Structures are given as structure tokens and as C-alpha cells.
Amino acid sequence: MTTTHIRPLVAGNWKMNGLAAALGEATAVNEALSGSTIPADVMLCPPATLLSRMAEAMRGSAVRIGAQDCHPAASGAHTGDISAEMVKDAGASAVIVGHSERRADHAELDRIVRAKAVAAHRAGLTAIVCIGETRGERAAGLTIDVVNRQLKSSLPDGVTGANTVVAYEPVWAIGTGLTPSTDDVAEVHAAIRAHLTGRFPAEGDRVRILYGGSVKPSNAKELMSLPNVNGALVGGASLKADDFLAIIRAYA
Ligand code: PGA
């Protein structure tokens, strides 16, 4: 079965960037998109401090809001953490879990990522589950093994096309300006699709598989047109409305 029926998603991950003044970039994205017919969903994932203000500013618009992380528990004694329920309460509809920067900076293992995805589902959020190999793993020919292992251990049961998005982000491509060849991206996305349809027969071909890692206006169209690439997770290039809009327009 083909996956051309999947509506793509272009999500911007602001990471630890953005003070209140940066909300103007989100507003500019929204204004540029309003009235347009681009056949893609658009999401911005600001830092937690801007979640509710951005959600308020985007209320009623086509721009959805996502968070960058959540704690597995709904509430409790976890100083500094934010639960999926809080993310939802702030106005977001999705949360990124298992980003490689969190896996590296906070020693997040697959089972923690899985627990966070479970929390996202519990709260009614879409979990954007990130996976991807390191430079060394790719050099050793382990990419497909690593991706399959991460999928097996990071994805919870009950995955549907509505409650889960998978983001393939080669660690070595994030923020480096490097991207895999289009053949390599297509190969990994096909392997992810095979994993999803094998484990979730009714829903696996509905789950969006995003590519992330140095997506920019100049390469978006080529990457987004590959089979089983159902959108992008964009870091640096999502911080400026003009760049982010140029990426979204890969679908125009
Ligand atoms: P980048 O980041 O687009 O800046 O490479 C992507 C990501 O980490 O989601």
C-alpha cells in the first residue's frame, strides 16, 4: 500500500531558543499561511516558556503547537519537569519525545522515551517520537539495526496515525548542514514503514514519518518528495519565518 494519502506535517523545533519577542516569527508564519491551501499540517514547538503564549497567539489558526518534552508522570514531585497533561493544558496538541539532544543531554533511554510517548497518549497528545543513528553507527553499517531497535523499544503499543509521528533524525545530520543521500533517506524511511506496518497492521501505513536533520529551503523539496517521507522536523531553519515558510512551500 502506498502512503501518498498521508497529509504531511512540517514541524519546527525551536529547541532552547526564543524569548517573547520571537513570537513575532510564529505570527508571521501564521499570517503568511492564512488563506493558503498548502496541503500540509504546520506545527511549531517552542520552548515550554512560550507554549501558552504561542498557543494563544495561534488560536483558531492552522498552526498547531507542540512541546519539546514531557515527563512520564501526570503530576508529582519532579522539580523542573512538565507533564503531558500540563503541555495539553498549555494549548499544545503534540509533544516531541526522545529527541537525540535529550537522549544525549539527559541520558534518556528508549524505555524512558516509550514512557513519555505513553504519557503523551494518555493526555491526548500526538507523540512525535525521534530516532536516528550516530555517525559511528552509520559508518559501521548499523543504521537499519539501530533504527529498528529504537522503534521496537521507544514506540508504545496502541500506535495510530493520529496519536504518533515518527521522526527519523540522523544524529550526525542535526545542526551540521549535512544530510544523508536521498537513497539513504528513502532506505531508512522504507525500513521504518515496514516496522510500523508489521507491528501495527491497521495503522502502520497511516503514521507520518518525518525526516529531520539540516532541512533547509534549498533541500526541502527533494527530501520531502521521497517515498515514505511525510514531512519534516526542522530545527534551525524554523526560527525564522521566511526560512520555515520556504520549507513548508515544498508542498505548494
Ligand atoms: P536542524 O535540527 O534542522 O537544526 O538540523 C533538527 C532537529 O534537531 O529537530
Image (cartoon, rainbow, N blue to C red):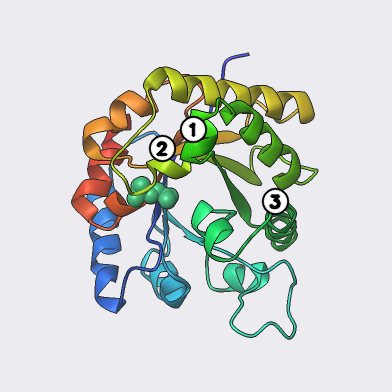
Side of 89 where 151 appears, left or right: right
Residue 198 marker: none
Q: Quadrant of residue 22?
A: bottom left
On the question of residue 252 being in view, the answer is no
The C terminus: image quadrant: top left
Neighbor class of circle 3 (other Cα within 10 Å; few <14, some 14-19, many 20+) is some
Which residue lies under the disc numbered 3?
110
Q: Which mark is residue 40?
A: 2
Q: Amino acid at mark 3?
A: Asp
Snapshot quadrant of residue 119: bottom right
Label 2 crowding class (10 Å Cα cut-off): few <14, some 14-19, many 20+? some
Whether tag 3 and tag 2 are in contact, CB under 8 A, the answer is no
Residue 20 horizontal/vertical position (percent): 30, 78
From the image, tell me which residue sits under label 1: 7
In percent of width and height, residue 12 lies at 38, 52
Q: Residue at x 75, y 71 (%)?
A: 73
Which amino acid is tagged 2?
Ala
